[in-house]
Amino acid sequence: MGRGGGPAYEAILAQPGQTLMGRIKITEQGEVLASKYSLPELALYNLETATTAVIQGSLLGTKFDEIEPWRHIMEEMAARSRDNYRKLIYEQPDFIDFFHQVTPIEEISQLQISSRPARRGGKKDLSSLRAIPWVFSWTQSRFLLPAWYGVGSALQTFLDENPVDHLKLLSYFYHKWPFFRMVISKVEMTLSKVDLQLAEHYVKELTQPEDRERFAPVFEQISHEYYLTCNVVLTITGHKRLLDGDPELQRSVQLRNGTIVPLGFLQVSLLKRLRQYRGSAAGGAARSRYSKGELLRGALLTINGIAAGMRNTG
């Protein structure tokens, strides 16, 4: 709850009506325990925030979730978003190879941070990959793809059907409907953490020379959806820049984004050397004065550092 930025208070209030009823069960990820509960004052603040939201949501819940036409519109947009997402993930023939080359998914699998392996059954296909390393790897390379891809196309398609009236309707949803506002605000927060310039550096440096031409359309497809999503979100919120509605979060994200850029370049360099080492045991050793273990340890340290800065790990 509230992991990686965004108000937990509003997230609780955005839960569907009649679901709180004075109680809520929350899973807190291990990486946020220190930042939220390590000091008595912090722990009290975060517990009071959650408790207040549950009480308010239980006693003063809105009826917007029960408006059938609104729910129908959301169902249609959700279906479109899901279809667009699946077209990239499952129908783009070069996508899986792209994913394995431009993200540190194989290195993440060697991190000792989980009680379960990154994959089920040890297979290297997408169906065997667990959800957390899937999101984690896209976060490391600054795509954050699973959090926003497909949203922009779905919203834009709805707007194109009736530009004036539908924009008024979505703006009204944003200002009046807690659920819709939270969906948009979470997408907006995630988009603000995307760094396509750095992501492109991962693509250029980590893809095999023979694969660059076939991977180019994949990156272009992702870039197009990113800019479309940014424009649609800004149109609905009325903001000039992402997170203009939450200056404190905006500043926090900007500061963290800046501090981890060097780690991204370090990570790319280490991953490139490590993969060269793996590709040719003899030739790789000649190309680097570091051992395979040293390169892996360095890469894993950058993964931990970027995760701490991004706070959206998986």
Image (cartoon, rainbow, N blue to C red):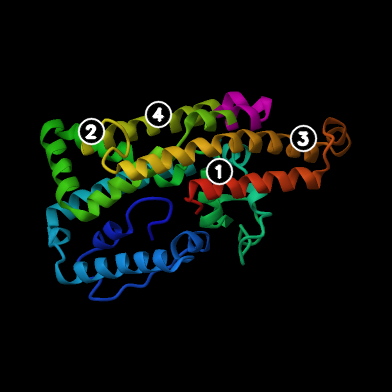
Please state the horizontal and vertical placement of residue 4, each as a whole percent of the image. 43, 51
197 on left or right of 290: left
- Residue at numbered disc 3: 276
Viewer-closest of 64 and 267: 267
In the displayed structure, 31 sits above or below 237; it is below
CA distance for labels 1 and 3: 20 Å
Residue position marked by numbered label 2 in the rendering: 235
Closest to the camera, between mark 4 and mark 1, is 1
The image quadrant that residue 224 belongs to is: top left
User: Residue 42, image x and y in percent?
Assistant: 41, 63
- Three-letter amino acid code at disc 3? Gln
> Regarding mark 2 in the picture, which secondary structure is present there?
helix
Could you say where residue 236 lies in the image, as x and y percent from the top left?
Answer: 21, 37
- Distance, label 4 to label 3, CA atoms, is 31 Å
Q: Overall secondary structure of the magenta stretch?
A: helix
Q: Which residues are magenta?
A: 202-215
- The residue type indicated by label 4 comes to His
Q: Earlier in the sequence, mark 3 or mark 2?
A: 2
Q: Position of residue 30 (x, y in %)?
A: 52, 63
Q: Nearer the viewer, mark 3 or mark 2?
A: 2
Residue lying at 23% horizontally and 33% vertically, measured from the top left: 235
Q: Secondary structure at mark 4?
A: helix
Q: Inspect the image, locate mark 2, and give the three-letter code of the amino acid beneath it.
A: Thr
Binning the other alpha carbons within 10 Å of mark 3 as few (below 14), some (14 to 19) or many (20 upward) gives: some
Residue occupied by mark 4: 224
Residue 209 part of the magenta-drawn span: yes
Label ID, residue 15: none
